[in-house]
Amino acid sequence: MTRKYIPVEEAARKWMKDPAFRAEYDAMEDEFALATALIRARADAEMTQEQVATAMGTTQAVVARLESGRVRPSTRTLERFAKATHTRLRIQFEREIPDLKATRR
């Protein structure tokens, strides 16, 4: 049996056309941003997940879960991650941009 593999980019383009999928995807923007920031901090420090875990006093599986975006870590955990990757944790609030479509109704 031969399997046809579809590139993830191609699948994503198709999924993004579905309004329900797009809404759910957009709702996860903050989780994606946090996961991206964690991965970037580790990569910039040129560390493996195992190395970060050792520096944090935890396991590689915990670091993998943090980077997956599926968990909401505490501020203390983020501070430990920052220390392990030789970075500084900065948390900021941004004003939301109003939905122009909603205000026109």
Image (cartoon, helix red, strand yellow):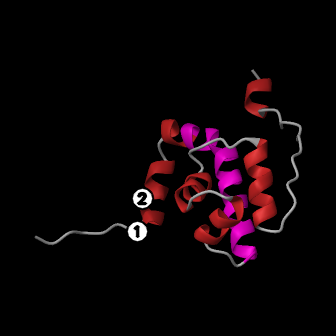
Q: Is residue 100 above or below residue 36?
A: above
User: Which residue appears at 87% of the width and 60% of the height?
Assistant: 88
Estimate how packed mark 1 is, as few (under 14), some (14 to 19) or many (20 or more) residues with alpha carbons within 10 Å. few
Q: In terms of secondary structure, where does tag 2 sit?
A: helix
Estimate how packed mark 2 is, as few (under 14), some (14 to 19) or many (20 or more) residues with alpha carbons within 10 Å. few
Residue with the mark numbered 1: 7
- Is residue 91 in the magenta section? no
Quadrant housing residue 80 = bottom right
Residue at the extreme front: 57
Q: Is residue 87 above or below residue 35?
A: below
> Foreground residue, 3 or 30?
30
The amino acid at mark 1 is Pro
- Span colored in magenta: 23-45
Residue with the mark numbered 2: 11
> What percent of the width, then of the height, locates residue 68?
56, 54
> What percent of the width, then of the height, locates residue 23?
57, 37
The amino acid at mark 2 is Ala
Residue 64 relative to residue 101: left or right? left
If the image is split into quadrants, where does the N terminus sit? bottom left
Residue 65 relative to residue 12: left or right? right
